[in-house]
Image (cartoon, rainbow, N blue to C red):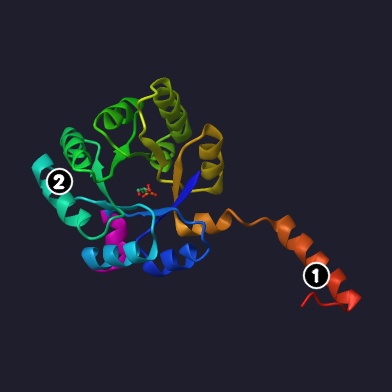
Amino acid sequence: MKFFVDTADVAEIRDLADTGLLDGVTTNPSLIAKSGGDFIEVLKEICSVVAGPVSAEVTATDADGMVAEGKKLAKIADNVTIKVPLTWDGLKACRAISQHGTKVNVTLCFSANQALLAAKAGASFISPFVGRLDDIGHDGMELIAEIKTIYDNYAHIDTEILVASIRTPMHVKQAAMIGADVATVPPDVLRKLANHSLTDKGLAAFLADWQKTGQAIL
Ligand code: G3P
């Protein structure tokens, strides 16, 4: 499974990219607002740090406006992926933008039928929001399983399932068990994936015993 980081914080992205484990980045208007930076400048900087897909979301709500914004954003770097909302206009824009050879991430997906339409519209990525479904008492992971089943039923569908609105390490594990292609994970949750108290405890014991030997490897 690919790991994207869900943030527009360039320092965080730089730090995580240094691990060599980061496959891409997703942003949205809320994350850009939180970063406090200029959208275009922030996007340029992120694209210079990460080689993989960087999702940049349009803010127009009509298809023509989305296409125009998408064209402008796509010029920033080769790895920009245009993010459009899952509305009829968004689907129309997805079709047009992807036909121009630019990758499209269709976001704000909350149903399997929406995901089916996004695939038909030529989306490279579909972003179902698991956390926001959990928030209203639904099962976000059930949606990921449904989309996975549906996409697997049709060999011609190559849209990648990009699990979004991830809140916990458990979400990441469940998404991987279902076989989702990508998880976009907030930086703090991404860091938690490597943590285990028994790892820390075990390492402390190994190092204490090693010190007793008086040896050094280098
Ligand atoms: O990138 C969109 C998505 O990940 C948002 O997550 O936590 O605001 O529901 P959240």
Q: Within 8 Å: ligand 1 and the Cβ of disc 1?
A: no
Q: How far apart are marks 1 and 2 (CA)?
A: 56 Å
**Label 2's element?**
helix
Tell which residue pokes out farthest to the top in this image: 153
Tell whether 62 sits left or right of 179.
left
In the figure, residue 24 lies in which quadrant?
Answer: bottom left
The crowd level at tag 2 (other Cα within 10 Å; few <14, some 14-19, many 20+) is many
Q: Does the magenta stretch include residue 58?
A: no
Tell whether 192 sits left or right of 113.
right
Tell me whether circle 1 and circle 2 mark residues in contact (CB < 8 Å).
no
Residue for badge 2? 66
For the stretch drawn in magenta, what is the main secondary structure?
helix
Which amino acid, by three-letter code, is at mark 1?
Leu
Q: Residue 48 or 36: which is nearer the viewer?
A: 48
Q: Give the range drawn in magenta.
A: 29-38
Q: Residue at x 30, y 30 (%)?
A: 119
Question: Residue 90, how many percent across, how many down?
Answer: 19, 38
